Image: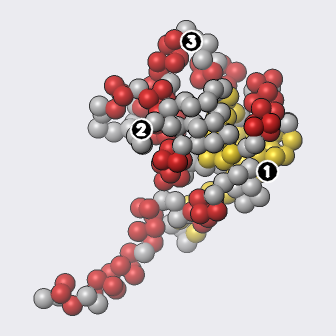
Amino acid sequence: MSQKKNDDVLVRITSIEGSACVVRGDDIDTDRIIPARFMKVVTFDDMGRHAFEDARKAAKGKHPLDDPRYSGAEILVVGNNFGCGSSREHAPQALMRFGFKAFVGGSFAEIFAGNCTSLGLPCVTLPSDQLMKLMDSVELDPAQRVRIDLEARTVTSRAGSMAAGIPDGVRMQLTEGTWDATRVLLEAGDAIERTAQGITYFQA
């Protein structure tokens, strides 16, 4: 992942590069990504090991997340309407803690994509024919490097360089570092103090 610091506070995410993993299928909902029984925890720390838990058990070791060819993959390539269903933040948290840093798909559920943005996880889209080419290429050669360039709006792999979709506002948040609300508040600390001091009823 290419990160640039702005004033040593905001982290700008301009590109992500690494090996990829393909999970085929449309309408994969958040309950499949992280079953509800694993949400009874205080922190997200161990959630990564339960990503796609039920699907992996049903596949008896043949799920892509258990395929050693995809070990260490940082980019997850998925189908259409990925992350639909409930609004649980646990889904992107689980995938992030499994090791994924970005997603390429046909489309993403809006709330899932928003939760990803707040974690600094880009979700970019490709037209169906281009997505199929990328999936086929990664499955043929899982060791290849895939690069998502948010500034150029491209996904590059052995299948070629493809124009990727990402909303302008989301792209701006990621590339300018304003996706991280906590860091934005820290950077604005002095301005917040000045504003507070200028509000008279706080000084009564």
Please state the horizontal and vertical placement of residue 16, each as a whole percent of the image. Answer: 68, 48
For marks 3 and 1, give the CA distance.
33 Å
Q: Would you call the spot at circle 3 few (<14 residues within 10 Å), some (14-19), or many (20 or more)?
A: few
Q: Is residue 165 left or right of residue 60?
A: right
Please state the horizontal and vertical placement of residue 23, each as a whole percent of the image. Answer: 64, 27
Instruction: Choose the circle earlier in sequence order: 2 or 1.
Output: 2
Circle 3 or circle 2, nearest the eye: 2
Please state the horizontal and vertical placement of residue 67, each as a whole percent of the image. Answer: 64, 18
Instruction: Report the amino acid beneath label 3.
Output: Ala
Instruction: Choose the circle earlier in sequence order: 3 or 2.
Output: 3
Q: Is residue 154 left or right of residue 6?
A: right
Tell me the number on the disc at residue 59: 3
Q: Nearer the viewer, residue 124 or 38?
A: 124
Q: Nearer the viewer, residue 13 or 109?
A: 109
Q: Is residue 137 left or right of residue 100?
A: right
The residue under label 2 is 86
Q: Would you call the spot at circle 1 few (<14 residues within 10 Å), some (14-19), or many (20 or more)?
A: some
Circle 2 or circle 1, nearest the eye: 2
Q: Are marks 3 and 2 in contact (CB under 8 Å)?
A: no
For marks 2 and 1, give the CA distance.
30 Å
